[in-house]
Image (cartoon, grey):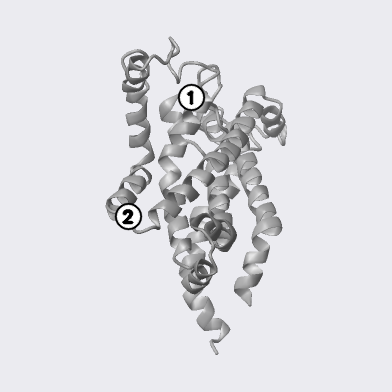
Amino acid sequence: MRTAAEVLFFVSPALALFLLFVVWPIVKAAQFSLYRWRGFGPLSDFVGLQNYSTVLHDEVFRGAFSHNLFIVVGSIVLQLPLGLAVALLLNRRIRGQGLLRTIVFVPYVLAEVIAAVVWLQLLQPEYGAVDSLLSGVGVPVPDQGWLGSPDRALWTVLIVLTWKYLGLAVLLFLAGLQGVPQDVVEAAEIDGASWWQVQRWITVPLLGPTVRIWVFLSMIGSLQCFDMVWVLTGGGPANSTTTMATFLVNEGTKRHNYGIAAAASVILFVVALFFALAYQLLVLRRDTKGAAR
């Protein structure tokens, strides 16, 4: 049995990095959020919780929060059935299986900024490939472009995010499918179950822990969504795609309201932590208990 000193010796490097790169920035952000600070000079103008009050009463931030929730729900609703369908299809023995898996997974390995720049060019009004293609088949396109219309911009961002992260869902589901006992599947087939019945009553239920982990990752990633939105729209038009992350970056880098930006970052951290803990307690706990046994 290892002694406490041995455990501390092996854990100390990781613990030191965690404290330095995770805990310390959070502490500093919390400290900045209590001051009116323009990004230079000492922290001298203490305002207490006023920055938090300003952020929470800001209509743009509240809109950003609702946009994050929209992306959370929309990503799960779109990517979950699509990812499951593609994973079940690619799990079958078909010609070109490896190539198809690669094609589905390629968008995920692209850097988010690169993917956003590519889609920004594709979605250019009138001259972009998307508008040209849709116009060619008679589908009307908005004059100001898909990203320039407040009513369509957030939906367009959601579709691009679905294209980008569908590969991760498929990869995780394919990995989960490898753990489905084949003897159970073969027994069901011998009993006369169709392919659809096997997926409906055996494969998908056994894939539950993998699906729940993917939902957790998708939820946290959606709450922290920044790069794609920043490159595609910058939060516009008219703040229709602003997320909590783009709000705080905009306040800090463009308006130099670092106290406001720090307060928004702390609120974002608390929101993400709340969702993570609630999901752990309400959904993932039974999977954790099963693993402990």
Lateral position of residue 126 relative to residue 200, left or right: left
State the image coordinates of residue 53 (x, y, percent, origin top left): 72, 30
State the image coordinates of residue 153 (x, y, percent, origin top left): 50, 22
Q: Name the residue that disc number 2 marks.
A: 94
Q: With respect to residue 66, does 291 lie above or below?
A: below
Q: Name the residue that disc number 1 marks.
A: 254
Kind of residue sitting beneath label 1 = Lys
Element under label 1? helix
Q: With respect to residue 220, does 39 lie above or below?
A: above
- Disc 1 versus disc 2: nearer the observer: 2
Please report the residue visible at 67 percent of the width from the left and 31 percent of the height from the top.
51
Q: Distance between the residues labelled 1 and 2?
A: 52 Å
The C terminus is located in which quarter?
Answer: bottom right
Please report the residue visible at 59 percent of the width from the left and 35 percent of the height from the top.
68
> Residue most toward the bottom?
1
Looking at marks 1 and 2 on the same chain, the residue that comes earlier in the sequence is marked by 2
In this view, the residue in front, 185 or 45, is: 185
Lateral position of residue 26 relative to residue 113, left or right: right
The N terminus is located in which quarter?
Answer: bottom right
In this view, the residue in front, 120 or 99, is: 99
Displayed quadrant of residue 73: top right
Please report the residue visible at 53 percent of the width from the left and 26 percent of the height from the top.
154
> Residue most toward the front?
192
Please report the residue visible at 66 percent of the width from the left and 28 percent of the height from the top.
62
In this view, the residue in front, 12 or 195, is: 195
Kind of residue sitting beneath label 2 = Ile
